[in-house]
Image (cartoon, rainbow, N blue to C red):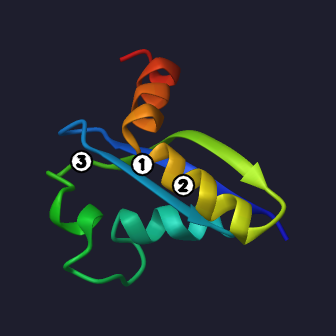
């Protein structure tokens, strides 16, 4: 099984979300409200009327590796890395 660490950016308000999953298409549909999700989730509260789009992703062989990378990307250095990858 592959585990995916991903970065979403909202098309309307330019907010960013970092997460990990095994099914990116299904997870993206949840973030965009096409599938049921918690109304209190970050992406539900911060969609600003826009659409969440995958802007960056990495694939890992284990969930442990994916979780470690997700935490790295959520750090200051990780966010700087994402900015460089997204040309921000």
Disc 1 crowd, CA 10 A, few/some/many (<14, 14-19, 20+): some
Q: How would you rate the neighbour count of disc 2 (Cα within 10 Å): few for under 14, some for 14-19, many for 20 or more?
A: many
Q: Could you tell me how far apart the alpha carbons at marks 1 and 3 are, in whole angstroms?
A: 22 Å
Residue identifier under label 2: 70
Q: CA distance from mark 3 to mark 2?
A: 24 Å
Distance CA(mark 1)–CA(mark 2):
6 Å
The secondary structure type at the circle numbered 3 is loop
Does 7 sit left or right of 26 as displayed? left
Q: Quadrant of residue 11?
A: top left
Q: Check disc 3: other Cα within 10 Å, few if <14, some if 14-19, many if 20+.
A: some
What residue is shown with label 3? 50
Residue occupied by mark 1: 74
The quarter holding residue 47 reads bottom left
Which corner quadrant holds the C terminus?
Answer: top left
Q: In this rendered view, identify the residue nearer to me: 77 or 47.
A: 77
The residue drawn where x is 46% and y is 23% is 86
Compare residues 12 and 75 and report the one nearer the observer: 75
Earlier in the chain: of badge 1 and badge 3, it is 3
Question: Circles 1 and 2: CB distance less than 8 Å?
Answer: yes
Label 1: which secondary element = loop
Question: Which of the 4 image quarters holds residue 1?
Answer: bottom right
First of labels 3, 2 by sequence position: 3
Asked whether disc 1 touches disc 3, contact meaning CB atoms under 8 Å apart, the reply is no
Locate residue 79, reporting x and y percent.
Answer: 40, 35
At 50% across and 55% down in the image, what residue appears? 71
Indicate which label's residue lies in the foreground, 3 or 2: 2
Vertical placement of 32 versus 81: above or below?
A: below
Q: Secondary structure at mark 2?
A: helix
Left/right placement of residue 57 relative to residue 16 reads: right
Q: Nearer the viewer, residue 28 or 21?
A: 21
Foreground of the two, 73 or 25 = 73
């Amino acid at each position: 099984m592959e585990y995916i660490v991903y970065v979403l950016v909202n098309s309307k308000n330019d907010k960013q979300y970092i997460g990990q999953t095994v099914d990116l298409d299904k997870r993206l549909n949840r973030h965009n409200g096409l599938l049921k999700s918690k109304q209190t989730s970050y992406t539900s509260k911060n969609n600003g009327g826009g659409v969440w789009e995958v802007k960056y992703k990495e694939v890992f062989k284990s969930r442990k590796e994916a979780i470690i990378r997700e935490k790295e990307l959520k750090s200051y250095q990780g966010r700087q890395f994402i900015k460089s990858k997204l040309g921000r």
